Amino acid sequence: MNLPLIEQKVEAAIGPLPAGGMASSLERRRLRFYLGQIMGDIAALLVAFILAGYIYIGRKTALFSVLLPAQLLLPFFLTIALQNGTYSLASLRNWHVAALRALAALLVSAALLNFVAFFAKINAQFSRVGFLIGMAIFAVFLTLLRAYAIRMVRRRWGPNALNVLIVDDGGPLIELAQCHRLDAAKAGLRPELDDPHALDLFARYVRNMDEVIVSCARERRVAWAMVLKGCGVQGEVLSDFMQEIGALGVTRREEIGMTTLLVSTGPLGLRARAMKRSLDIGASLLALLVILPVLALAAIAIKLDDGGPVLFRQQRVGRRNQLFSIYKLRTMKAERSDALGNRSASKDDDRITRIGRFLRRTSIDELPQIFNVLKGDMSLVGPRPHAIGSLAGDKLFWEVDRRYWHRHTLRPGLTGLAQVRGFRGATDHEADLTSRLQADLEYISGWTIWRDLRILAATTQVLVHDRAF
């Protein structure tokens, strides 16, 4: 083998190879960045506690009084920060993650310091108030430093801080910014385990890479997987089959000695579900105090209008695609109510009563769903529940887009992201459903308790709308 010729081919394909072993230039930049972060954190800690001394104790004794807690805290903080990933690749990608890890390291190190100081009987030698002020200032510095660092990384290195190599070997085209690309056929790469020279050539291409993604024909996937396993990098093989079934990952089941594809998972963990449910119950109980008089007046008006029942129950699709009975104030004539929801209400719908038209326009007819929330069938915020016979144009909802069933991984809501964006009312066309479905799936994938609160606040501005028929 002509090794200099091989090196020339590699450089021509993915750029100049750095001198000095396996470490790439990007890896060295990352190492310098981590060292810079550590030095910056050390300086920030000392400055924070000196400022705390000036603020609380006074200029004359400030320096002496803060040196002890700062010196004691520093080794604890650096040890925890190095262990919890404060200085890691994740800290280069997202400043929120970087800041949270740094703050977590600060809190844990402060707790450990106070624990040790208590048993060593030295905690009386520094001011508790001064220590808390120094901690607060240092926490602000940590957050600001992370936000600035991410901006600097993206400005200098681009959106990706990793060396990613995509190997095209006859599979689907991968669209990914900030990566190296390699045509396997032109480079003479073959996934042949019986040819050490072929493996050596591939190793020279990937030696500076953090991740390698191979897009190949189905019959070569196993061979490429075997080659990647020996390369010492994160290797991935693109699979259109896994894309078709929406696989989320791979799980190894030791009890059966087999590997399975993970195709679904709950969108919220236990803590998130507890937070969301607590908001539902607390806010619903408070809302009941306000809406009970409104419900009473609405019930009287419905009775006086035509003498029929006040409430209307209808089967809707809820969490896990399970049916439940939704409560609404009756707005249609009792004998013409649509239990299956086969026909969407229209602007000049002759089924709607006089009082019903007002209740729909003001969304008062939806208020009894507070009881669905308290029962646990619904949430305050989530995808709106639909009747099983609902149509978009002349198709059932799930016939328009099979992802429709994915929107039911969370409890349905009184309001949702789709509603505050104006996607509500009749679904006369398939696009009316598609826009709502996209908003629902976006809400599920990006749920936070703060988004729920923002949606609830935004809902107050769209309670009265021109698409409520």
Image: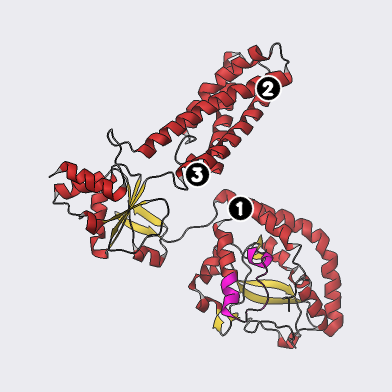
Badge 1 or badge 3: first in the primary sequence: 3
Q: Amino acid at mark 1?
A: Thr
Vertical relation: 205 (above or below) 41 = below
Disc 2 to disc 1, C-alpha distance: 35 Å
Element type at marker 3?
helix
At x 40%, y 44%, the residue is 162
Please give the residue where the numbered disc 1 appears in the rendered image: 448
In the rendering, at what x and y percent does residue 355 appear?
A: 82, 79
Please give the residue where the numbered disc 3 appears in the rendered image: 154
Please give the residue where the numbered disc 2 appears in the rendered image: 52
Q: Which residues are magenta?
A: 415-435
> Residue 22: which numbered mark, if any?
none
Quarter of the image that includes the C terminus: bottom right
Badge 2 or badge 3: first in the primary sequence: 2
Quarter of the image that includes the N terminus: top left
In the rendering, at what x and y percent does residue 173 appear?
A: 35, 63
Left or right of 366 in this view: 42: left
Hey, which quadrant is residue 439 in on the image?
bottom right
Q: Amino acid at mark 2?
A: Ala
